[in-house]
Every structure is written in C-alpha cells, then in structure tokens.
C-alpha cells in the first residue's frame, strides 16, 4: 500500500464520519507531516502497541 491509497482510505473514513472538507484538509496536512517524519515501521509499531488507546 502506498501513501496515496492510505490518504484515500482516510478521506473516505473521515467523510463517512461527517467531517467537512476544511477539516479533512487540515487533517491531511498533519498526515503529510507524519509521513515525512515517522517511518512506516515506527507507525506500525505505534499502532500495534495500543499506546494510542490510552492517550488523550
């Protein structure tokens, strides 16, 4: 899977949750920053760790 397909899934999910285009664009801007600063391995390990479930 590449970054563009991830963005597509993400946009579809956000639209399904009722997010407006302005909100989606703001979130995508942050997503681009994450793509540029976090490796795929680091993101995967963060997801698997479940740490995000306990963060506010």
Image: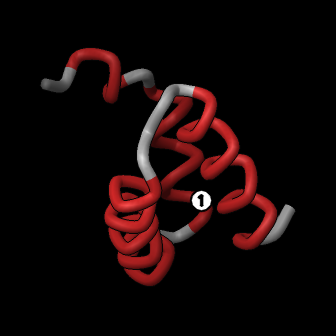
Residue in the picture at 51% in, 35% down: 47
Question: Residue 36: where, in percent of width, then height?
Answer: 45, 83
What is the quadrant of the N terminus in the image?
Answer: bottom right
Q: Can you give x and y, in whole percent of width and height, for residue 7 in the image? A: 66, 61
The vertical placement of 12 against 25, above or below, is: above
Report the residue that reaches farthest toward the left: 56
- Name the foreground residue: 49 vs 15: 15
Q: In the image shown, does 49 or 26 lie closer to the viewer?
A: 26
Q: Pointer 1: what residue?
A: 41
User: How many badges with numbers are in the image?
Assistant: 1
Callout 1 secondary element: helix
Q: Is residue 44 above or below residue 41?
A: above
Dot 1: few (<14), some (14–19), or many (≥20) neighbours within 10 Å? few
39 lies left or right of 11: left
At x 32%, y 26%, the residue is: 51
Who's the residue at 62% across and 29% down the image? 16
Report x, y in % for residue 8.
Answer: 73, 58
Rendered-image quadrant of the C terminus: top left
Where residue 4 sits, quadrant-wise, is bottom right
Compared with residue 52, is residue 9 higher up or lower down, i.e. above or below?
Answer: below
The extreme bottom residue here reads 36
Q: Where is residue 33 shown, x and y percent of the image?
A: 36, 77
Answer above or below: position of 6 versus 34.
above
Q: Is residue 56 left or right of residue 17?
A: left
| Residue 5, quarter of the rendered image | bottom right
């Amino acid at each position: 899977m590449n970054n563009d397909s991830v963005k597509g899934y993400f946009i579809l999910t956000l639209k399904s949750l009722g997010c407006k285009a302005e909100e989606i664009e703001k979130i995508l801007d942050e997503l681009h920053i994450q793509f540029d600063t976090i490796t795929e391995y680091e993101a995967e390990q963060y997801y698997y760790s479940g740490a995000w479930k306990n963060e506010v």
